[in-house]
Image: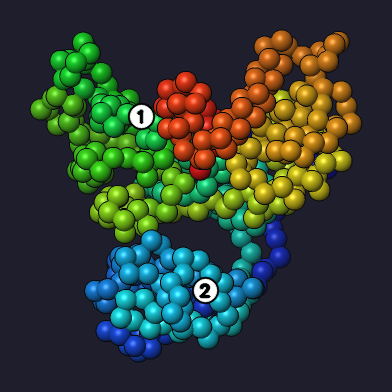
């Protein structure tokens, strides 16, 4: 097993070329009949009326972002993006389905035929792509993420990072910042999902003294504090509609005004945004401004869930053990790798980290009901050479994870009800859920 060494940069090794399955879509009927779309990259194709789709339709009954198609060895994945009038297969409205080549779909007044456009050999990723040591993994998916990070770090455009909760979106944002010309300035993170709507504008743009009750002095906001650096807008999909125009103004004019102020302040920052939502579906639902989406998604990185890259489990486990113990060996978890690879990982990398930490502390592997004894004693047994604070923190993390899982199950997945049952403030509960990779 290769040790995980904490160095400033690591290099990807070249991989063999792989087969890319291509996709062709033909418009059979509707306002755009006769149009054909067969993108060179072949595997993904978005359809709608917005100009940044691969296939742009003029059908008024089609949504801005209507559906996305993925070509896979198993067939063609059809994913409706929360469209207004739906995606229809025969007489059935589908949200997600896998269909064979030759299938016809109806969206709005348009009929589409999905064809197999064959396959071709894709060139291997570059052999010399530097990446942060926090981007751990050997899968093709994580190597592609590393390549995109390397590419976008060199420019100053906005980047949208999309992925499920716990996939490491903030890690990717930090990797972009640290590889960029702005690395010597601050990266300021704003969690749009945990702030009260009434305070978000103040957190982003600052406020003047007396701007509202309790504003007893002037306060600099995130954009002002990040001057010359980078702002990460985490969980941007939760940003209230009433605040979105002000953020759009910053992106377009590179200037903002503090809450309660009148002076326009020029700003030099790079904006990164992260979300677990598909913002195209949020645009369709009217919860997110289309023009703001365009400004944020100049470049886009989609982070694959851990369940789709089982080959990254072993290097990630070694990485976490090395961070926790200083030793880059699998140790007590070496015999549990198959069990770890088979786990669905709804909390993704964050859940894996918590499981590894708890296994080292408690001496058993706990995968939500599946328990297996580790091959070494727990670090909290008598005589263990572990700092009290570290052992206590790990045990607390294990308790919190189990408590929160049980709480959310009792509340039927409703965060407000869970907060009531726990006699806990809802914002604090959401913070704990994010901390342990349990927020969906």
Left or right: residue 15 versus residue 290 is: right
Tell me the number on the disc at residue 42.
Answer: 2
Mark 1 or mark 2, whichever is nearer to me: 1
Question: In x, y percent, where is residue 146?
Answer: 57, 49
Say if residue 66 shows up in the picture: yes
Residue at 10% x, 27% y: name it: 262
Quarter of the picture containing the N terminus is top right
Question: In x, y percent, where is residue 121?
Answer: 63, 74
In terms of depth relative to the viewer, which is nearer, 41 or 74? Answer: 74
Residue at 75% x, 49% y: name it: 341
Tell me the number on the disc at residue 195.
Answer: 1
- Crowding at dot 1, Cα within 10 Å, few <14 / some 14-19 / many 20+, comes out as some
Residue at 79% x, 16% y: name it: 380
First in sequence, mark 1 or 2: give its number: 2
In the image, residue 343 above or below residue 198: below
In the image, residue 348 above or below residue 19: above
In terms of depth relative to the viewer, which is nearer, 200 or 440? Answer: 440
Q: Secondary structure at mark 1?
A: loop
């Amino acid at each position: 097993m290769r040790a995980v060494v904490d160095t400033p940069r690591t290099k990807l090794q070249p991989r063999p070329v792989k087969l890319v399955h291509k996709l062709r879509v033909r418009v059979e009927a509707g306002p755009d009949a006769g149009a054909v779309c067969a993108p060179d990259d072949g595997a993904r194709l978005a359809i709608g009326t917005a100009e940044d789709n691969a296939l742009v339709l003029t059908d008024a009954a089609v949504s801005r972002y209507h559906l996305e198609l993925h070509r896979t060895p198993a067939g063609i994945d059809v994913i409706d993006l929360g469209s207004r009038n739906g995606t229809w297969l025969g007489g059935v409205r589908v949200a997600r389905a896998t269909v064979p080549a030759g299938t016809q779909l109806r969206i709005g007044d348009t009929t589409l035929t999905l064809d197999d456009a064959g396959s071709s050999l894709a060139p291997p990723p570059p052999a010399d792509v530097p990446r942060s040591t926090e981007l751990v993994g050997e899968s093709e998916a994580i190597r592609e993420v590393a390549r995109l990070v390397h590419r976008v770090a060199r420019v100053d455009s906005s980047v949208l990072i999309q992925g499920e909760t716990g996939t490491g979106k903030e890690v990717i944002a930090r990797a972009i910042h640290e590889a960029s010309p702005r690395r010597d300035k601050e990266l300021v993170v704003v969690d749009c999902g945990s702030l009260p709507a009434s305070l978000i504008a103040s957190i982003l743009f600052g406020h003047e003294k007396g701007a509202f009750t309790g504003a007893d002095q002037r306060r600099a906001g995130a954009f002002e504090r990040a001057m010359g650096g980078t702002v990460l807008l985490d969980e941007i999909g939760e940003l209230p509609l009433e605040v979105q125009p002000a953020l759009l103004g910053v992106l377009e004019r590179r200037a903002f005004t503090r809450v309660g102020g009148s002076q326009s302040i020029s700003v030099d920052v790079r904006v990164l945004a992260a979300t677990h939502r598909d913002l195209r579906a949020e645009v369709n639902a009217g919860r997110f401004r289309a023009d703001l989406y365009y400004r944020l998604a100049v470049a886009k990185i989609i982070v694959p869930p851990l369940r789709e890259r089982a080959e990254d489990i072993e290097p990630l486990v070694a990485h976490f053990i090395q961070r926790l113990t200083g030793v880059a060996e699998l140790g007590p978890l070496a015999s549990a790798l198959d069990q770890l690879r088979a786990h669905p990982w709804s909390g993704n990398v964050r859940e894996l980290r918590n499981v590894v930490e708890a296994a080292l502390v408690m001496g058993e592997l706990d995968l939500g009901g599946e328990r297996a004894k580790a091959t070494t004693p727990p670090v909290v047994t008598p005589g263990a050479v572990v700092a009290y604070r570290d052992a206590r923190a790990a045990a607390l993390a294990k308790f919190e994870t189990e408590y929160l899982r049980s709480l959310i199950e009792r509340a039927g997945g409703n965060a407000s009800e869970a907060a009531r049952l726990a006699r806990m403030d809802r914002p604090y509960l959401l913070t704990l859920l994010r901390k342990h990779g349990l927020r969906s």
